[in-house]
Image (cartoon, rainbow, N blue to C red):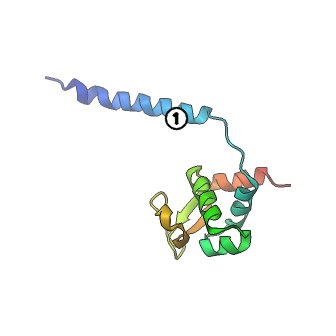
């Protein structure tokens, strides 16, 4: 006897993934804000949270929120505190000040599109 659930489930899962991917790709891309641009410009190399605070002049709360937005959009990768190992997507957003960050390829392309 053939287990129909086992043979149809991967196909259904594949269809759901395809549909979700099409949905994400069809969404209009949100423009990045001036503050997000300022953060991305600082992240050509791996930089700690403290460096971003000094260079941008943002409050810790504002910087935290902007970083989380950029991480969720795939523009920033999160690194261990020493900056040697990527920990994305497994980082503690409540203690984001303990990590280092670097712009991803798509993050760098985004700031290149906004260059004057």
Q: Residue 79: give x, y in percent of width and height.
A: 53, 67
- Residue at 36 percent across and 28 percent down: it is 11
Q: Residue 74: give x, y in percent of width and height.
A: 58, 51
- Which residue reaches farthest left? 1
Left or right of residue 103, residue 17 in this image: left
Q: Quadrant of residue 116?
A: bottom right
Left or right of residue 8, residue 92 in this image: right
At numbered mark 1, what does the secondary structure look like: helix, strand or loop?
Answer: helix
Compared to 72, does 47 lie above or below? below
- Residue at 49 percent across and 68 percent down: it is 95
Q: Report the label total.
A: 1
- Which residue reaches farthest right? 116
Q: Residue 80: give x, y in percent of width and height.
A: 50, 71
Left or right of residue 61, residue 81 in this image: left
Can you identify the residue that label 1 sits on? Answer: 21
* Residue placed most toward the observer, 84 or 35: 35
* Residue placed most toward the observer, 61 or 36: 61
Compared to 113, does 15 lie above or below? above
* Residue placed most toward the observer, 59 or 75: 59
Compared to 10, does 72 lie above or below? below
- Residue at 59 percent across and 49 percent down: it is 73
């Amino acid at each position: 006897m053939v287990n129909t659930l086992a043979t149809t489930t991967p196909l259904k899962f594949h269809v759901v993934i395809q549909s979700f991917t099409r949905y994400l790709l069809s969404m209009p891309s949100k423009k990045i804000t001036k503050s997000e641009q300022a953060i991305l410009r600082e992240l050509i190399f791996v930089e700690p949270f403290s460096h971003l605070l000094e260079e941008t002049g943002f409050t810790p709360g504002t910087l935290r929120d902007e970083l989380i937005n950029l991480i969720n959009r795939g523009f920033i990768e999160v690194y261990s505190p020493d900056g040697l190992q990527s920990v994305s997507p497994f980082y503690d957003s409540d203690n984001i000040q303990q990590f280092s960050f670097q712009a991803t390829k798509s993050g760098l392309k985004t700031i290149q599109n906004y260059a004057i």
